Amino acid sequence: MKLYNVNCLDYLKSEQFQKDIGGGQALIVTDPPFNVGYHYNTYKDKMSEQEYLYFLNQVFKTNNTPYVVIHYPESLYKIALYNGDVPTRVCSWVYNSNTAKQHRDIAFFGVEPNFKQVLQPYKNPNDKRIKKRIEEGKLGCKLYDWWNINQVKNVSKVKTKHPCQMPLEVMKNVVGVLPKESIVIDPFMGSGTTGVACKELGYEFIGCEIDSEYFDIAKERLEEIKLF
């Protein structure tokens, strides 16, 4: 696991990136800034649309790595069109909130996720066929493409000072369906949730965060994880 308090583009274009990857399969997984005016400490979340799409294009295409993006559906369409890429799979994360936006999509580009790698509880455990599977020791069915998971609320015990902290369950679903040999890179690490998911699931992780306070939050979260 490697963490860098740097501008992600500087890292992705560096010799250090090539050294860290070492010929392995790099794969970007990120919930990027949404360009809607969020109040971050360092990053200014308000570019023109063309500047924003170009910026993300540089992040995703500099090394021609596969990438997974979490974003609002309309923005994902624009990113895909601008990059000239078609996703191999798209799934939805749905949540209740006090805003007009009630869901985001997760688009997989250049990588085929395996939803059999993540199990979810059976929805109809009283069905005779399901009861038999449970008796046989089966723990659940493969992950569906529609996830109803609450956002991290300000009153949550796991909430950090980062304004847009991702739920760990969402990131464990995203990471968990990826090829096991992937070296997961989050260029917008934020509070470090992607890294936490990787560490708990046994994936290699590289994280970049431009803001020093958010970087320290992510570093501390990751250092607190004790694996047995």
Image (spheres, rainbow, N blue to C red):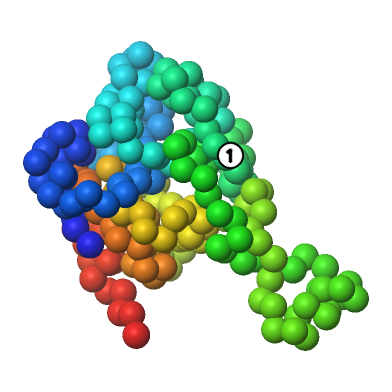
Coordinates of residue 190 in the picture (x, y in percent): 30, 49
Question: Considering depth in this image, is 7 or 181 the residue closer to the camera?
Answer: 181
In the rendered image, the vertical position of residue 155 relative to residue 138, given as above or below = above
Residue 65 falls in image quadrant? top left
Residue 128 falls in image quadrant? bottom right
- For the C terminus, the image quarter is bottom left
Residue topped by disc 1? 90
Coordinates of residue 219 in the picture (x, y in percent): 22, 62
How crowded pointer 1 is (Cα within 10 Å; few <14, some 14-19, many 20+) is rated as: some
Q: Is residue 189 left or right of residue 101?
A: left
Q: Which residue is at a point 16% across and 45% down the rendered structure image?
A: 17
The amino acid beneath tag 1 is Val
Query: Is residue 163 visible from the viewing direction of this image?
Result: yes
In the rendered image, the vertical position of residue 96 relative to residue 8, given as above or below = below
- Residue at the front extreme, as displayed: 23
Coordinates of residue 110 in the picture (x, y in percent): 45, 37
Question: Considering depth in this image, is 196 or 130 the residue closer to the camera?
Answer: 130
Coordinates of residue 135 in the picture (x, y in percent): 77, 85
Q: Which residue is at a point 77% across and 65% down the rendered structure image?
A: 123
Question: Considering depth in this image, is 3 or 163 the residue closer to the camera?
Answer: 3
Query: Is residue 191 visible from the viewing direction of this image?
Result: no
Circle 1: element type = strand
- Labels in figure, total: 1
Q: Which residue is at a point 38% across and 27% down the rendered structure image?
A: 35
- Residue at the left extreme, as displayed: 15
Question: Considering depth in this image, is 224 or 187 the residue closer to the camera?
Answer: 187
Q: Which residue is at a point 53% across and 24% down the rendered structure image?
A: 77
- For the N terminus, the image quarter is bottom left
Q: Is residue 42 left or right of residue 205?
A: left
In the rendered image, the vertical position of residue 161 relative to residue 158, given as above or below = above
Q: Is residue 200 left or right of residue 107?
A: left
- Residue at the right extreme, as displayed: 128
